Image: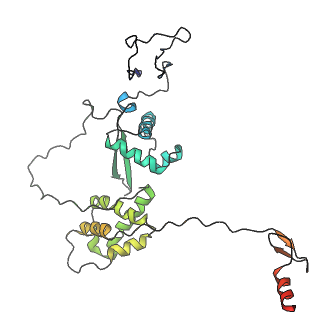
């Protein structure tokens, strides 16, 4: 594999015309203005070639650049979902999810949702080490039909649905189960796999608001119009956006209850819990009654 060239022009040239001279002691290139000095060794095993277009990207965050370099170094089939990356690095799910979106925006990552043979929805991730390269192999096109068929009328796009903050696989799978169960309440709510893929994030956004799957099911099936539903997916998308409940109020964690040590009552010698020695509650009550 080719080695990476890390030569970068300094921000300002020195008095000697920008010529850097080797150091007599180390043999490395000395910089006149206190900039970086490279002490490089040629890698022969276990290395990854990363382009300067990534490492010096003007718009990507440092987290996104490092995450892309890590993903490019992984073997094919390695997990790169938000949960797996959060377990590997200390940045947390929020920053990792934001970095993945950056890489998608700039073409270093492609993520698509696909359905497996057993009906599960999975995310397929493709890492691109050089976005927009002209030598990329195009996707194979389906064979052209032997005869011309009538084109179906253009399909109107579904309304936008809310998006979850953390689209975890388990959350999306539960959301898909909610959509699949709607037709049991009303057969008119039978939707296609394509429509379900569009609606799943909206249901997941509801589940993130501490709603049970049963509660989301009831909200989507309540008060349906009596007439036939020509576009049930559009109705569900509208309800998911228009009836989205607010986020639950923040509840700070409760402080643990204080457990006092055992004390022996000075009057009856029975054990009781209190911060300091003294008399138990029963003896104090008897003393107050006799007084």
Q: Is residue 228 above or below residue 145?
A: below
Left or right of 64 on screen, residue 280: right
Q: Is residue 61 above or below residue 170?
A: above
Residue under the image location 42 percent in, 73 percent down: 214
* Residue 248 percent coordinates (x, y): 45, 68
* Residue 289 percent coordinates (x, y): 84, 91
Residue under the image location 38 percent in, 62 percent down: 205
* Residue 84 percent coordinates (x, y): 49, 47
* Residue 80 percent coordinates (x, y): 44, 44
Figure label count: 0
Taking depth in this image into account, of 243 and 192 the one nearest to the observer is 243
Left or right of 161 on screen, residue 72: right
Q: Residue lying farthest top?
A: 24
Q: Is residue 147 above or below residue 192?
A: above
Structure colour scheme = rainbow
The quarter holding residue 150 reads bottom left
Q: Residue lying farthest bottom?
A: 290
Taking depth in this image into account, of 57 and 207 the one nearest to the observer is 57
Left or right of 153 on screen, residue 163: right
Residue under the image location 41 percent in, 27 percent down: 49
Quarter of the image that includes the N terminus: top left
Q: Residue lying farthest front?
A: 15
Quarter of the image that includes the C terminus: bottom right
Residue under the image location 49 percent in, 27 percent down: 46
């Amino acid at each position: 594999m080719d080695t990476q060239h890390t030569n970068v022009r300094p921000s300002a040239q020195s008095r000697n015309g920008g010529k850097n001279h080797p150091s007599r002691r180390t043999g490395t290139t000395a910089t006149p203005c206190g900039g970086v000095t490279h002490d490089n060794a040629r890698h022969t095993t276990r290395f990854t070639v990363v382009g300067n277009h990534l490492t010096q990207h003007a718009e990507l965050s440092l987290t996104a650049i490092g995450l892309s370099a890590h993903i490019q170094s992984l073997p094919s089939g390695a997990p790169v979902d938000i949960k797996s990356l959060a377990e590997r690095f200390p940045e947390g799910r929020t920053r990792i999810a934001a970095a993945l979106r950056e890489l998608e925006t700039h073409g270093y990552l492609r993520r698509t949702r696909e359905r497996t043979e057993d009906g599960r929805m999975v995310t397929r991730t493709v890492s691109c080490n050089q976005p927009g390269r002209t030598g990329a192999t195009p996707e194979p096109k389906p064979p052209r039909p032997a005869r011309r068929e009538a084109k179906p009328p253009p399909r109107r796009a579904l309304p936008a649905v809310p998006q979850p903050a953390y689209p975890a696989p388990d959350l999306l799978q539960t959301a898909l189960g909610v959509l699949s169960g709607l037709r049991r309440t009303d057969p008119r709510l039978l939707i296609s796999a394509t429509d379900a893929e569009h609606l799943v994030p909206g249901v997941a956004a509801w589940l993130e608001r501490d709603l049970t799957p049963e509660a989301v099911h009831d909200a989507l099936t309540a008060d349906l119009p009596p007439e036939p539903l020509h576009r049930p997916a559009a109705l569900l998308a509208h309800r998911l956006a228009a009836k989205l409940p607010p986020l639950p109020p923040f509840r700070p964690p409760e402080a643990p209850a204080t457990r006092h040590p055992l004390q022996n009552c000075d009057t009856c010698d029975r054990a009781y819990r209190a911060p300091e020695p003294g008399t138990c509650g029963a003896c104090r009550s008897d003393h107050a009654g006799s007084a």
